[in-house]
Amino acid sequence: MDKINVVSKDPFTAIIITNSAGICHFLDDEGFCSIQLKLGYEYLSRTCRIHPRSISYINGVFETFLELSCEEAARVVLFDEEPMRFEQAVLEPDGSGNVIPNRMLTADKYTPLKNGVDLFNKLRITSVEIVQSRKYALRVRMLMLCILTEQIAQLFSTNHDSAAFAAADEFLVLISTGVYDSIAEQMPDGIEIDFAIVLDILRDMSKRDDERFYNILEQSLEGHGISLDTAEFSNEFSNEYKRAYKKFFGNKEYIFENYVVNHILMEGFPFNFGKESGVMANFADLLAKYNLIEFLLVGSCMFHGKFDEWNIINCVSAFGRRYDHSLKGYLMME
């Protein structure tokens, strides 16, 4: 039991403690699960049984996604140059004969509208369409998503939830007719990355034992020519960052686009699962993850001096395990 930490009486909240490299103690020397080898598939925990799939029960519909902490899942999701799309298929039951979702969401928890499910779907798909508007740089698209989210937050705060339908439709019309071209011209960098906030979060992430993630973080910081103790960022640093981004990802923004879209779909943006702090807080969470992964990947490419697919996959996978698995678990317990 020293390899498992039971955080409550709820049978679904036990956490398997990983070693210093972030690896499960139950993996053997060849990387295979010793539990499955010795006892069989049916003895695996719910999480391990479906990994890297993530099953959500959203408004009465089962949806499956891929957790990017799995290297192969990260490759499949991030390196598809075509815009991400939904596929409908029959969901196979797990070994117990039941489909057990990781998370559940019902729109009526977030809006009093009787057609709240329609509103959730409208905002969710509109968000994806904005992020996939490749006419604009991705950070400009993120600025557009921020503008829409602010409008929705204002409507929610004044109990005008029903007006959010028209706001979403109107926003897409403005994009398609080029109204937002002027914003793209005036603010070509869109929502710029706040390096101080990124570094502050990375400091917190580095406090926990995870040798694999820490090595990646150290390489990224070295590539940027800074350390966790860096307090200020000059214009020269910002300009060098933009040059590196353009060099390594100028024609590969679809990688970050896919990352953001995967988050929107899997987390139930803009309502998000179990988060009632407001749609703007949920946007801030999305933006933080996007900034963090971009910062790490750009720095890693600068460290290695090249764009390498395996290196990108390794970074995203380690970040997923560190942020989505360990960090959220620790924050939940604290």
Image (cartoon, rainbow, N blue to C red):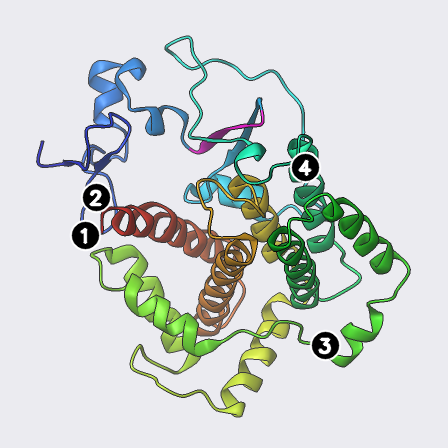
Instruction: Decide whether residue 57 is among the magenta residues.
Output: yes
Tag in front: 3 or 4: 4
User: How far is mark 2 from mark 4, CA to CA?
Assistant: 37 Å
Indicate the position of residue 75 as horizontal and vertical percent values: 53, 45
Tag 1: amino acid: Ser
User: Which residues are the magenta region?
Assistant: 52-59
Tag shown at residue 223: none
Q: Please give the residue where the numbered disc 1 appears in the rendered image.
A: 20
Q: Which residue is mark 3?
A: 188
Hey, what amino acid is under mark 3?
A: Pro
Find numbered disc 2 in the image and state the secondary structure of the residue it sits on.
loop
Helix, strand or loop at label 4? It is: helix
Identify the residue at the far right of this view.
Answer: 177
Query: Which residue is found at the position 76% from the left and 65% from the top?
Result: 136
Residue 103's quadrant in the figure?
top left
User: Is label 3 in contact with label 4 (beta carbons under 8 Å)?
Assistant: no
Which x, y percent locates residue 228?
31, 77
Q: Residues within 10 Å of mark 1 (few under 14, many from 20)?
A: some
Which label lies toward us, 1 or 3?
A: 3
* View extreme (left): residue: 2
Q: Return the residue at label 4.
A: 121
Q: How many angstroms separate mark 1 from mark 2 (CA)?
A: 7 Å
In the rendered structure, the answer to whether residue 124 lies left or right of residue 9 reads right
Earlier in the chain: of badge 3 and badge 2, it is 2
| Residue named by callout 2 | 18
Q: Amino acid at mark 2?
A: Thr
Residue depth check, mark 2 versus mark 4: number of the one nearer the observer:
4
